[in-house]
Image (cartoon, coloured by chain):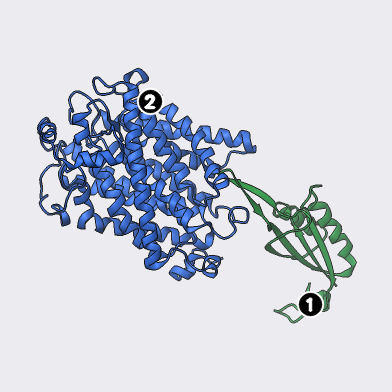
Amino acid sequence: MRSAPSPLTPNFAHRLTLGLGLFLSLILALAPDAAFAQETSMVAAKTFDSGDTAWIIVATALVLFMTMPGLALFYGGLVRSKNLLSVLMHCFAITCIGSVLWLVIGYSIAFGSNDAIWGGLENMFFAGIGDRLRDATSIPESVFFIFQMTFAIITPGLIVGAYVERIKFSAVVIFTTLWLLLVYAPSAHWIWGGGLLSDMGWIHASLDGVAAMDFAGGLVVHANAGVAALLLAKILGPRGGFPNDLRPPHNPGLVMVGAAMLWVGWFGFNGGSALAANNGAGMAILVTHISAATACIVWSAIEWIKFGRPSLVGIATGAIAGLATVTPGAGFIGPAGALVYGALAAVICFYAISLVKRTMGIDDSLDVFAVHGVGGILGILLTGAFADSSLGGVGLPEGRTIVVSVFGQIAALAVTVVWAGVVSYILIKVTQVLVGLRVGAEEESEGLDITSHGERGYDL
Amino acid sequence: MKMIMAVIKPAKLDAVREALLGIGVQGMTTTEVQGFGRQRGHTEIYRGSEYTINYVPKTKIEVAVEDAIADRVVDAIRTAANSQAIGDGKIFIYDLGEAVRIRTGETGAQAL
């Protein structure tokens, strides 16, 4: 899938295609088209490669490590001490739920076939996969399966930051389950699994030249999670005391440790998305690192100028903003472009936080939308331009201009955000009806560690 | 005998200890506490949001002394804990009815 757009890989699977709105796209994509077969037949058969396979196995471990314990600690340090364990528990439980769902049906929906809408049910419980290679790669599909599983785990994990300190644990379980199957898996299918937004989609063949690029998940991971987070935070309501009477993050040291683990894990996230151990993977890691470092510097500079002191929580947040923003572009852009990604990520995400919290008054508690959603969307838009060789990228596919490329990005963005928004909203309401969303005021005040899980993080 | 209780800045604890040892005080008890005075806490900024810290971390010290040196102890604390800034803390002095050394059963000034 996430190969770079070089002439050697005509089946450049990250070209999302869309020239029309969601409605029209869905209708058009319903009609199977000869173009599918034509596109697929252009894929050169690859043979097993142990180097590629070894790298993706390592990358899989790195991405799992991002959620457990990276994201868990990053988020855990940002909440109050009475809720630390609940956040760790959310991340842990989501990892397990996502893993089992992925085996049962998630993978099949996302990657089972090249159908425009969904992958079907044929690969439920790993059926029909055996020891074959994943299409258009040199790695076994079992390795591709578990690499993708780690993405399916971290995406609902990111949403945790929106609902910490007040959500019912049962609501986390139910919402995560439904959301993974109805938002994440279809979205992954459309963009990475040969669905309607991929280069195998009907639109790519019909409206050649309009396509979009999402290397490692600016849309699939970060925009999806960000949109769900914003809605969930809005419907759930703010934490008691928001915005002026909250206690600050209880352990910035944990925040730093978690952010550092996420940073390293992101090498697997973006580098692994090349699905090969090659220069594309190396470049992806290089631009990932440069974007993160640049965003840290700029974020700290903003704080230093604005507040007189650069903070640890700030520099760690800058890192995550830089990493999320470079994610869709990682395999397409050059190192100089990464400087631009990182700098813009810091400035825009920094101000997005106060836009959401102060102007909109939404307690997206750990800024999932402002950092991941906004970062992912920013990266998607930038990638339309920075993939071009004139801006240091690997080059847009032949015949595609920057304008057309950016248009394709916007179209794919619109489809993703609308689907994630509408379906997430419905799923939040379903969860609300089934188990309720929020713990009682007294439980919230006492803390979720004791009231939801019967444990305390600190005995001081 | 007097019990002298002072709430000071945590950073001043060592200076106070040195000053008290210098005038012959034999022991003291310290506790990490939180509170507010006219300073009314302060604010901290995380990710651009201001958080009001209503209870400021302080160190409480308690020293039991003979009446004869009580004034000197108060002066020593006042000098050592003073940074000329808001939030330096306060000293409270009460009369102490009795003191007992647990090991020997000695009482009064003998027990201090």
Residue A389: x %, y % from top left: 32, 19
Q: Which mark is residue B99?
A: 1
Vertical placement of A296 versus A251: above or below? above
Mark 1 burial class by Cα count in 10 Å: few <14, some 14-19, many 20+: some
Depth order, front residue of B58/B46: B46
Residue A107 shown left or right of residue A176 in the figure: left
Seen at 83% across and 59% down, the residue is B23
* Quarter of the image where one finds residue B8: bottom right
Residue sticking out furthest to the bottom: B105
Hue of chain A? blue
Vertical placement of B106 versus A227: above or below? below
Depth order, front residue of A15/A331: A15
Residue A318 shown left or right of residue B17 in the figure: left
Q: Amino acid at mark 2?
A: Pro
Q: Secondary structure at mark 2?
A: helix
* Cα–Cα span, label 2 and label 1: 73 Å
* Quarter of the image where one finds residue A6: top left
Residue A153: x %, y % from top left: 32, 52
Vertical placement of A193 versus B7: above or below? above
Hue of chain B? green
Q: Which mark is residue A335?
A: 2
Depth order, front residue of A44/B112: A44
